Image (tube, grey):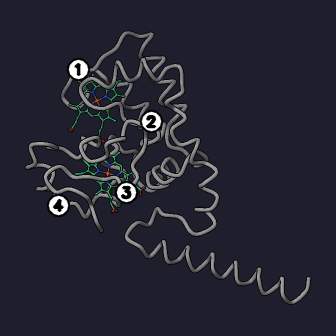
């Protein structure tokens, strides 16, 4: 190896490390460093692949009536399993399903749940849930909290157009498609989010 290529490699490693450390010191500790972000690009197309799943329309019909059909990659597998096992007492509602639909939806959610090898959001959610007890809600995951802690609760809870942080689609117009692009966030009554 000649000097020039050694220098380039050293530069890349140091640069990569520096951006990783930088990302970790950011308020969002679930962001990745430079190399991981390069790698993420390859996975972006896989991020919302659940929309093409044959069970998606059943999921949307059965679980998208009271609230939006949440992207399955926003919770890890054990969280979905626990939720699907207690639908008769679902956040104070009864969301019970016939056995066949429940089995199909469980399989759909588990296959597309947050995991270490899926898309970017999926991996960040998964990482953020490995340190704590399994979250019962998306809004209880470390990743969700890291991304929304700057939003004052009264902007949401006392806002007649939102009312709850669980209303992802109130601020993220393409939430059901798994698209949470920060540049597209609009908070009703407040407009675009600049941070
Ligand atoms: C009868 C109405 C109803 C049905 C049907 C229903 N849900 Fe819910 N769900 C709720 C309510 C109410 C909440 C709590 C929302 C809140 O706190 O603002 C909730 C919350 C959730 C949350 C947590 C959102 C958060 O705060 O992070 C998830 C995930 C969820 N539901 C998934 C499902 C799935 C999967 C199904 C289908 C098996 C389903 N729901 C069907 C009423 C329903
Ligand atoms: C009151 C408006 C509001 C609601 C409701 C809301 N979000 Fe957000 N969300 C935001 C804002 C604002 C940001 C950008 C935060 C920042 O700049 O760091 C964001 C960022 C995100 C990001 C990170 C995007 C990225 O590319 O870094 C994800 C993922 C996300 N939200 C998912 C959700 C989910 C899932 C829900 C529902 C359970 C939800 N949000 C509900 C306002 C909202």
Q: Quadrant of residue 118?
A: top right
Between 146 and 51, the one nearer to me in the picture:
51
Residues at marks 4 and 3, CA–CA distance in whole angstroms: 17 Å
Crowding around mark 1 (Cα neighbors within 10 Å: few <14, some 14 to 19, many 20+) is few
Q: Is mark 1 within 8 Å of ligand 1?
A: yes
In this figure, which residue is indicated by the disc labeled 4?
152
* Residue 12 placement (x, y as % from top left): 70, 78
* Residue 145 placement (x, y as % from top left): 32, 57
Q: Quadrant of residue 34?
A: bottom right
Q: Residue at x 39, y 32 (%)?
A: 82
User: SS at mark 3?
Assistant: helix
* Residue 159 placement (x, y as % from top left): 10, 48
Q: Residue at x 48, y 37 (%)?
A: 77
Tell me, for residue 94, which label it has, or none. Answer: 1
Residues at marks 2 and 4, CA–CA distance in whole angstroms: 26 Å
Residue 188 in the figure: left or right of residue 184? left
Q: Quadrant of residue 150?
A: bottom left
Q: Residue at x 25, y 58 (%)?
A: 192
User: SS at mark 2?
Assistant: helix
Whether pointer 3 and pointer 1 mark residues with C-beta atoms closer than 8 Å, the reply is: no
Crowding around mark 2 (Cα neighbors within 10 Å: few <14, some 14 to 19, many 20+) is many
Tell me, for residue 182, which label it has, or none. Answer: 3
Mark toward the start of the polypeptide (2 vs 1): 2
């Amino acid at each position: 190896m000649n000097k020039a290529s050694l220098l380039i490699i050293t530069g890349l490693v140091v640069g990569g490390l520096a951006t990783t450390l930088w990302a970790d010191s950011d308020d969002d500790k679930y962001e990745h460093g430079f190399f991981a972000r390069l790698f993420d690009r390859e996975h972006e197309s896989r991020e919302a692949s659940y929309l093409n799943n044959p069970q998606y329309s059943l999921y949307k019909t059965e679980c998208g009536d009271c609230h939006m059909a949440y992207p399955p990659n926003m919770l890890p597998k054990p969280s979905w399993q626990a939720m699907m096992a207690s639908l008769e007492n679902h956040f104070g509602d009864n969301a019970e399903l016939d056995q066949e639909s429940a089995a199909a939806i469980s399989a759909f959610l588990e296959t597309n749940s947050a995991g270490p090898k899926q898309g970017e959001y999926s991996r960040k959610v998964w990482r953020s849930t490995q340190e704590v007890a399994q979250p019962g809600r998306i809004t209880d995951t470390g990743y969700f909290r890291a991304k929304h802690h700057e939003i004052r609760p009264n902007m949401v809870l006392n806002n007649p157009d939102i009312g709850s942080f669980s209303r992802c689609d109130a601020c993220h117009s393409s939430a059901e498609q798994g698209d949470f692009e920060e540049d597209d966030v609009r908070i009703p009554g407040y407009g675009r989010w600049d941070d």
